[in-house]
Structures are given as structure tokens and as C-alpha cells.
Image (cartoon, helix red, strand yellow):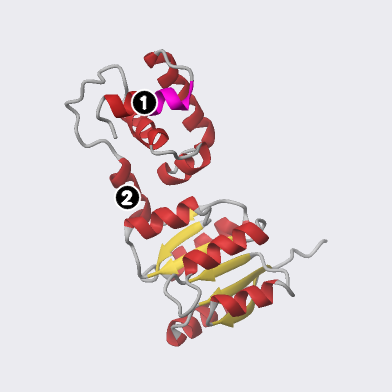
């Protein structure tokens, strides 16, 4: 029988009490190997140069390099590493930056132990995980609240995607922001082009501008 390799986790957080508590929680899990606990993004990058890690759990607010920058660097240098943001911040603009930066998970620090383990296991399986609170905040930000629109032949989801296309978001970024598959995004884009008689994203952006959608 082949022994399953443990998921190697690195935690980066300068709040020592939280860091110690999270470390104690993960150390008790058989199929997770806690590689280290560090207090800065700079020290995390030095470690990643020397050791293979599967998941980096990080806070956003840290002295020097913050979690947004750390996530960006990790995704550029080590795209195979999964990143989990574990923070007290639920500001939409910060969440937006991290989702656009391909962060694989986002969880608030008040999450229960079971959900924390669930997100670690999800990332280990190659799945992204965003907490219910984060999904609701992002979906609310990009949802169409005014139903009295002139675009009667477009669905609410199509208008949401049209707005994001017009703002310059890529298919991958729209997929991340709306928590839907890239296939679904592409299907809606094709439907938009067909319904509006347009040929490309530039045409969609022009239509959205001329019709007050953005």
C-alpha cells in the first residue's frame, strides 16, 4: 500500500497568538505537515526558495510585504503553490485584488475549525474555496440591482458579465470574481455577441458605454 504524502503547509502571520493557535490546530491533523510558521512575507519567500510547499496560508496586514504582494509574487514564481488568505479584512476592494491575483482561497479569521480544515483539504485537491461571507460580498458588488433596464433581451447575469468585460476583465478574472466556470463565462459572452450583433469584446465595451451600463 502506497502511503499518502502529507500536504505541506506554511503559515505567514505576524499576529503571534493567532499564529500559535493555528499552528496547534494543524499539527493535530494526520495528513497535514506544518512546514513552518513565519511572521513576514520576506522570510516566506526565502523559505520557498529552499523547500517545496503545497499551501501558503497568509494574512493580509503584515509589516513590510503585505499579503497582496506576497500572493502576487508566489503566483508568478511558484504557480503550483496554493494560497489561502486568512484575514480579518472583508473589504471588497482588497478581496477583488486577491481574487484577480489568483488567490485560491479566502477565509475570515473568525471561521470555525471545521471550515478551516475544509478549505485546506479543498486546496489540496486542487479546488478553490471562498467562504460564504466572501462570496456574498463579491456577488453583491457585481450583481445588477436595477431591474428597470432597457436591455430587455439580456439576462441579469449577461449584464453583469457585460459590465466586467467593458471594465477590461479577462475571462479568468470574471470567472474568479463571479465564482462561475470559465466555460460559463464564455457561453454568456457568445450569447451577448449574438444578441447584440457584435463581433468582439471591444464592441461589447462600446455598447456598455453607450447604453450607460458602465
* 18 on left or right of 52: left
Q: Which residues are magenta?
A: 200-206
**Residue behind mark 1:** 206
- Residue 130 against residue 175 in the figure, above or below: below
* 46 on left or right of 88: right
Query: What separation in Å lies between label 1 and label 2 (alpha carbons)?
Result: 29 Å
Q: Nearer the viewer, residue 13 or 198?
A: 198
* 198 on left or right of 146: right
Main structural element of the magenta stretch: helix, strand or loop?
Answer: helix
- Residue 168 against residue 100 in the figure, above or below: above
Q: Quadrant of the C terminus?
A: top left
Residue 28 visible? The answer is no
**Residue behind mark 2:** 136
Q: Nearer the viewer, residue 66 or 209?
A: 209
Q: Position of residue 54 (x, y in %)?
A: 66, 64
Q: Quadrant of the N terminus?
A: bottom right
Q: Position of residue 7 (x, y in %)?
A: 66, 66
Amino acid at each position: 500500500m502506497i502511503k499518502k504524502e502529507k500536504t505541506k503547509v506554511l503559515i505567514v502571520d505576524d499576529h503571534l497568538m493567532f499564529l500559535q493557535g493555528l499552528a496547534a490546530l494543524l499539527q493535530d491533523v494526520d495528513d497535514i505537515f506544518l512546514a513552518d510558521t513565519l511572521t513576514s512575507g520576506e522570510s516566506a519567500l526565502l523559505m520557498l526558495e529552499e523547500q517545496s510547499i503545497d499551501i501558503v496560508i497568509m494574512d493580509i496586514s503584515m509589516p513590510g510585504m503585505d499579503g497582496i504582494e506576497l500572493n502576487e509574487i508566489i503566483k508568478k514564481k511558484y504557480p503550483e503553490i496554493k494560497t489561502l488568505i486568512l484575514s480579518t479584512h472583508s473589504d471588497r476592494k482588497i478581496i477583488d485584488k486577491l481574487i484577480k491575483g489568483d488567490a485560491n482561497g479566502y477565509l475570515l479569521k473568525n471561521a470555525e475549525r471545521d471550515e478551516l480544515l475544509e478549505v485546506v483539504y479543498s486546496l489540496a485537491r486542487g479546488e478553490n474555496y471562498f467562504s460564504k461571507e466572501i462570496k456574498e460580498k463579491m456577488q453583491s458588488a457585481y450583481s445588477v440591482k436595477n431591474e428597470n433596464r432597457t436591455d430587455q433581451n439580456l439576462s441579469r447575469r449577461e449584464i453583469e458579465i457585460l459590465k466586467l468585460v467593458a471594465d477590461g476583465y479577462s475571462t479568468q478574472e470574471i470567472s474568479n470574481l463571479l465564482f462561475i466556470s470559465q466555460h460559463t463565462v464564455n457561453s454568456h459572452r457568445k450569447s451577448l455577441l449574438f444578441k447584440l450583433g457584435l463581433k468582439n469584446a471591444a464592441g461589447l465595451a462600446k455598447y456598455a458605454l453607450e447604453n450607460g451600463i458602465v
